[in-house]
Image: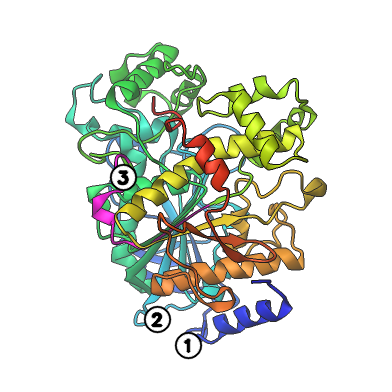
Amino acid sequence: MKLTRRHLTSVALIAALTPVSSATPMKANPTVAIAAGKVRGRARGEVAEFLGIPYGADTQPARFEAPKPATNWKGTRDALAFGAACPQGGGGDKQSEDCLVLNVWTPTLEKSARKPVLVYIHGGGYSGGSGSSPVTDGAELARRGDAVVLTLNHRLNVFGHLYLPHLVREDRYAVSGNAGLLDLVLALQWVRDNVASFGGDPDCVTVFGQSGGGGKIACLMAMPAAEGLFHRAWTMSGQQVTAQGPKGASNRAQAVADHLNVAPARLAGIATERLLAGLAARDPSISGGRVYWGPVIDDASLPVHPFWPDAPKQSSAIPMVMGNTKEETGSLIAMGDPSVFSLTWETLPARLERDMVTDIEVAGVIRTYRELFPQIMPSQLFIKATTAGRSWRAQVIEAEARAREQGPTWVYQLNYANPREGGRYGAHHTLDIPLVFGNTSKKEAETGDSEAARMVSAAMMDSLMRFAHTGDPSGGSLGQWPRYDLGKRATMIFDAESRIENDPRKAERELFARAPYIQPGTY
C-alpha cells in the first residue's frame, strides 16, 4: 500500500483516538513512589520523563555474580539525568560498573491507567551500547502510542559474560557467563513490581530490541528466570540461534586472564580500568579476532540454545515480530570502509571470502547474483551477499522454527534506504531504530527527516503500537499483515510504498540454505 500524506494523517488520527494525557495535568516535576523510594522526574509536554532510576545495586562489589536489587534510599531521588553505561572503552556515555539503571517515559501517572509497556533493549552486540542514545529517546513513542516506554543499561562484555565456573570453583560465579542477561531479568522484575506507579500495565509488557538487543530477547525467550515477565517480543536485525558452549567460553575467559597476566580467581578484584584492558585479548577460536562476548549454555540461567534445534518451548505462545533491513552490511561493513565501493570483479572474490561468514563457494555466489541482477555492481553484490550470508540467515532460521511450532509470528523487511550519498548504503543496520521511536528529526538519525522518512516511521510506529496493545501488528493504513508460515512466508516490506510480499529474496534464501549456519562467535 502506498503511503501518502492522507495515510500519514490517518495514522496520526488513529493514534489520537486514544487520549494520551492523564486525568490530571502533568506536573512540571512529577514525583513517583516506587519500591526503593521516591523519584522526581520532569514533564516534557504531554509526557513525564524519569531518567537513571536504579533497578539494581552497584555490580562492582559483586563482580561476575548474579545482580542484586537496588538499595532503598530515603527522601526523593532526582531522576533527571541518564545513568552510567557499562564500561566498554571509548568516549561518549559516562561509564561505571554501577550501571543497572533504566529510563521511563509515560503519558500518565495514574496507577489505574494500565497502559501497555514497551521495554527497549539496546544493541551493540553484547559488548557496547547504552539506553541513552538520542535516537532511542522514548518521549515521542510514549506520546504517540499512549504507552509507557523504558530503556535501560546492563552489564556487557567482560563484566557481563566472563564464564568462570570451569576456572574458579566458587558457587557465586555459577552464572557469570550470563550475568548481563540476568540484569535484564532483574530489570523486567522491576517493571513487574513498579511500572504500575508510572501508569503501566505489568501484565502487558512488550520487549523490543535492535541487533544485540534482539539477540538478548531471543535468549530471554529461553531463560526460565524470564518466563512470565514479558508478553510480546519485537526484534530488529537481532537474532541468537545458538550460544557459546562452556568449553569455548572457558577458553575465552582464560585468554582474558592470560592477556592481563592475572589468575582467573583474581579477576574479580582488579581495577575496572585494568579489567577493561582484557577486551583486547585475542579470541582462542578460529576467528582470531578480539574475544567474543555473548551468552553461554550454563545449565542454569540459559539451559538450552535459544533457537536450536527448535524455538524455545517456554515462549512458543508469545506473539513475536522479527525483522531485518535489506542491506544490513551497508553500515556494518561499508559505512566504515569506503574501499567496498572500489571493489572490482577481480577483487570482489577475495573480499567476499573474508566477510561473507557462510562457508560457501564464492564463485557460485557471484554467478548467482549476476544472474539475478544483471546490472549489479561489485559493491552492491558485496553488500547483498554479506547481508544474506550473515544476520538475515539467522532471522530466517528463527522465523522457520516459530512457524513449525505455529507460534504467532510476523516478519518484516525494511527497504527504506538511507538517503545519504545517493542512497548507496541502502536500508542498512540500525536504520529502523529512529523509525520505530519516531525520532527521524534527531541529528543522529541516518534516516533523514523527509516526508518519506516520517511516513515510514509512522507506519512502523503504528504497527509496533498495535502489537503492544493487542498482540497483532495488523491494521491501520497497512491493512492485514498475515502471520508468517512456511508456505507463503508473508513479509511486511516497510518502504515509501509499504506492502506485503511473499518470500522476498527467495533465491538468496535458497542459495545460502545450501550451507549450515554457524552463529558468529559461538564456535
Q: How far apart are marks 1 and 3 (CA)?
A: 37 Å
> Is the N terminus in the top left, top right, bottom left or bottom right quadrant?
bottom right
Task: Classify residue 4 by image quadrant.
Answer: bottom right
The residue where tag 2 is placed is 110
Q: Where is residue 41 in the image (x, y as percent from the top left)?
A: 50, 67
For the residue carrying disc 1, how many other residues have a C-alpha within 10 Å: few (<14), some (14-19), or many (20+)?
A: few
**Residue 25 in the image: above or below residue 148:** below
In primary-sequence order, the first of circles 2 and 3 is 2
**Residue 422 in the image: above or below residue 251:** below
Label 2–label 1 contact, CB within 8 A: yes
As helix, strand or loop, the secondary structure at mark 3 comes to helix
Q: In this view, does 82 lie to the left or right of 469?
A: right
Q: Does the magenta stretch include residue 311?
A: yes
Q: How far apart are marks 2 and 3 (CA)?
A: 30 Å
Label 1–label 3 contact, CB within 8 A: no
Q: Which of the numbered marks, if any, corresponds to residue 182?
A: 3
**Range of magenta residues:** 308-323
